[in-house]
Amino acid sequence: MSDYRQFVLDNGLRVMLRRTPTETLAGRVRVHCGALRDPEGKHGLVHLLEHALIYAGTRSLTPQQSTALVNGSRNMPVATYSDSMQFGFQSFPEDVADILNVYADMIFHPRFDADAIDAERKRVVREIGETREELRMDDKKYEELLMRNYPQRISSHRVRVSGDVDVVRSTSVEELRQLHAHYFNATNADIVLVGSLPENIEELLRTHFGDKPAGALHQYAWPSIEPLDNATGFRVAAPYLTNRENPDESNTHVKIGFIAPSYTAAEAPAFIVLNQILGGRGGRLQDSLSQVHGLAYFAKSFHNPMPSAQYCEIEARVADRTKKEAVDLVFDITERLRTEDVSQEELAAARSISRLSFALQLECNQMSVHALELKLDYYELSVAHLLASVQRVTPADVRAVAHKYLPRGGDGNYVLMVREPAEN
């Protein structure tokens, strides 16, 4: 992907632009201040700050006006993640100047209206309650076991991102101002725009963002993860899975999680191909558990290669009476991949599907924004690099990453969760 322009404004704000032959464009402003920047014992401060920036007014907008803009007809989603706060949008070219103006004001010139912030506290408290309600305790246990050596990566960080109710209720406006002053500077931000960009887009960016204060970069550096050194497993009673009319056909959900390489690892292309062979469309899980043995209609693997995640999961839904047979088959599949070379035909098909998935990203403005952010964060990493690297993967490469990462039966390197109809 060479059809982009990258530059840095005088105040340190990093910019990436890519023109595509579309009628619309997508963009995102990131500030590298996420929930991991919450002060100790103050989980929820960044989340409340997000609401204050959006809904508590700016130097030129009242709280009512800023709320109307974000909640109105324009697609302007804002969210807080572990490592950043993200201000996204999709629009027609003629609306870009207004959106950039609004976001520049929200991000760098918040009003911090006390009454509006008090109203947002109540909304954030309700959001925390709903998040905790939606997160099953068994999923939380599974994720904590999977990431037990790296607790900051737990996928259920939604709870941490949302925060603690007491913190949200007690945080002062001054604490929000101090947090904002420390992290919200142009040097600690970037913006990516993809699509039908106005001819004067660089002038617009300099007009709306060029005068923002410079500062320090606080981008979070995610360390790599090593595979687990032992196996853990647990069972969860799920009465809703019981087929009361025909108990022998009651379902069980099996999930096996394990550590996997991120996009930034040299092994990533080989593992991407391996994951397709293992659990992609037409992969070995689907072929064996579904087509050959008829144990499951649904059997797949999912690889999350983001540096903030770095895991893979095998999932299958099987009849409760065949769950042991299904798990044994899964481990038989992974063991063969760990010890035997895949055929050239299977490899070629997996490489082709993997390359297609990356190529499709570049044909969608929103996905292309994400791809450019990866390159912005990790320099040489790009979709073009992954496309080329996937094509060079060999059977020996696949076997090597399978041997290192795929779960082994017995005392292997995984977390097994079995959600079954009733306690057995």
Image (spheres, rainbow, N blue to C red):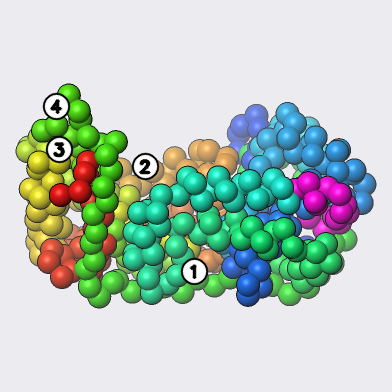
Amino acid carrying label 1: it is Gln
Q: Which residue is mark 2?
A: 356
Q: Real-space Cα distance between discs 3 and 2?
A: 34 Å
Tell whether position 70 is magenta: no
Instruction: Give the amino acid type for the residue marked by disc 2 in the picture.
Output: Leu
State which tag comes first along the sequence, 4 or 2. 4
Q: Determine whether the residue tagged by mark 3 lies in a helix, strand or loop.
A: strand
- N-terminal label among 2 and 1: 1
> Going from the N terminus, do you reach mark 1 or mark 3 first?
1
Residue at mark 2 to residue at mark 1: CA–CA distance: 32 Å
Badge nearest the viewer, 4 or 2: 4
Q: Secondary structure at mark 1?
A: helix
Disc 3 residue crowd, few under 14, some 14–19, many 20+, Cα 10 Å: many
Res. 182 visible in picture: yes
Residue 312, given in percent of the width and then of the height, sits at: 32, 57
Q: Name the disc covering residue 319, or none.
A: 3
Q: Are marks 3 and 2 in contact (CB under 8 Å)?
A: no
Number of the label disc, if any, that sits on residue 246: 4
The alpha-carbon separation of the residues under discs 1 and 3 comes to 35 Å
Neighbour class for label 4 at 10 Å: few (<14), some, many (≥20)?
few
Q: Residue at x 43, y 44 (%)?
A: 359
- Viewer-side label of 1, 3: 3
- Amino acid type, label 4: Asn
Q: Which residues are magenta?
A: 107-120
Residue lying furthest top in this view?
245
Specify the label residue 152 is tagged with.
1
Q: Main secondary structure of the magenta part?
A: helix
- Location of residue 294 in the rendering, given as x and y in whole percent from the top left corner: 10, 35
Q: Which-is-in-front pick, marks 4 and 3?
A: 4
Mark 2 surroundings: few (<14), some (14-19) or many (≥20) residues within 10 A: few
Q: Judge whether residue 397 can be spotted in this image.
A: no
Point 20% across, 28% down: residue = 244
